[in-house]
Amino acid sequence: MDSSSETPQAPHVGRSTEPLVTRLAARGVHGVALTWVDNAGLARVKAVPLARLGQAAERGVGMSPVFDIYLVDDSLTSSRYTGGPDGDLRLVPDLDRLTPLAAQPGWAWAPVDRFEQDGRRYPGCQRHFARRMTDRAAERGLELRMGFETEWVVTRDGAPAATGPAYGMTRMVELSAYTGDLLTAFAAQGLDVLQLHPEYAPGQFEVSVAPSDPVGAADEAVLVRETVRAVSLAHGLTPAFGPAVAPGSVGNGRHLHLSLWEDGRNLCAGGDGPFGMTRRAESFLAGVLAALPELLAVGAPSPASHLRLQPSRWSAPFRCWGLENREAALRFITGAPDDPAAANAELKCFDPAANPYLVVGSVIAAGLAALDSDDALPDPVSGDPVDQGLPRLPRSLPDSLELFRGSALLREAMGDELFEAFAAVRAAEAELFADHSPEELAAATRERY
């Protein structure tokens, strides 16, 4: 049996939800939004009244598998295993992640795992893929801690909502009530925010949250984005999470930070490898760096991603790594000498069009594949890579998709059903936007995610 379909029973069968429902009702919650992220990178939802939460946890909520082949514009493609109107899945909420939504009074949220009607895990479930790769790392004695940085642009009536300079306090003052409400909502939902600040592009902001387990980090990436969306709309602002908001300018990234731990020790520090990393950490990161060309189809999966991935814009379009180098696709961060827990690596070439569950799962798979061969990192790069003769990452979605399709590593990790459905969506979006100008492509995608 394919490992992606193992675990024959939903996790909450037999668990009483009455105490949870009672607590939520006391907080004024009347409905629960159940979300998953499809292969186009969009959060899809089914909602249930609070009184139906127990039934949803026990039996799931019905949803067609066809959403695995939806594109960003809601049109459809097909894959070898998925397509057409037939079939049904059960969406089972993860009650351990259920969160009352501070910016949507009366609502709570929970991510779902997707199951077949007979209780088997659905092999196309992206969240289960992330969990399987996390478990695979645990079998090697490794714990992954991950966290996303999320960037977005807010506009009002089509123009940037703040006119202050990049990273400037002026912008924070202009939107003080807005950013204050963001922090309040994040805290009320249990999100541990590390930083919230203006970014480079007009009207652009970034929030980063503390690291979590890989599945939790992906869950929080979904929750962060939907919280930003709700608070923005409440302030009369329109958030844009697309990789390219305006062609020719800096786009939105969603960088992934990660560190490896073993028996409570951060393997990114205290070793005799480059900049203090241990050999296991170096091999893991070497595997990720080597696989970045095919990983790019997962982490920067939109045709618009390649409007963002331009040299000398801190978008990291070159396959290289360096210490605190914000132009390198893989940036290594040592942290303060007295804080070894802070050492980590950052993947800077990824963006908000990506499904975060596919991102964390694919990165783990690539890193683990290099452990047995004891791979080493190449020499680090300092300065702007643009004139150093370093290899560029793929320059278009068709180019990255070709490498993805040829990746035996990612096919094995994902399983055929998920792999083929994802590839089909990426190919269809490349065709969908093939004749778009950069301006048309940015306009069609910037507010879809």
Image (cartoon, rainbow, N blue to C red):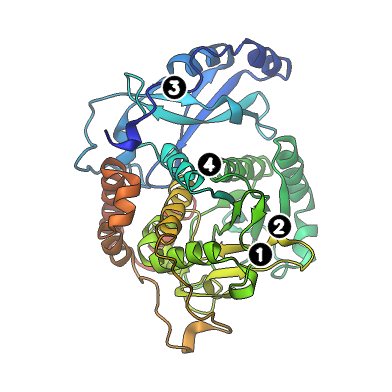
Q: Position of residue 384 (x, y in %)?
A: 55, 83
Q: Which mark is residue 269?
A: 1
Q: Earlier in the sequence, mark 3 or mark 1?
A: 3
Q: Earlier in the sequence, mark 2 or mark 4?
A: 4
Q: Amino acid at mark 3?
A: Ala
Distance between the alpha carbons at the discs numbered 2 and 4: 20 Å
Q: Quadrant of residue 127?
A: top left
Look at discs 3 and 1 and give the one toward the viewer.
1
Disc 1 on helix, strand or loop?
A: loop
Q: Position of residue 177 (x, y in %)?
A: 78, 48
Q: Amino acid at mark 2?
A: Ala
Disc 3 on helix, strand or loop?
A: loop
Residue ID for mark 3: 10
Distance between the alpha carbons at the discs numbered 3 and 1: 38 Å
Label 1 near label 2: C-beta < 8 Å?
yes
Q: Earlier in the sequence, mark 2 or mark 3?
A: 3
Look at discs 2 and 3 and give the one toward the viewer.
2
Residue ID for mark 2: 341
CA neighbours of label 1 inside 10 A, class few (<14), some (14 to 19), many (20+): many
CA neighbours of label 3 inside 10 A, class few (<14), some (14 to 19), many (20+): many
Up-down: is 396 above or below 23?
below
Residue ID for mark 4: 215
- Please tell me which residue is depicted at 70% across the width and 16% down the height of the picture: 23
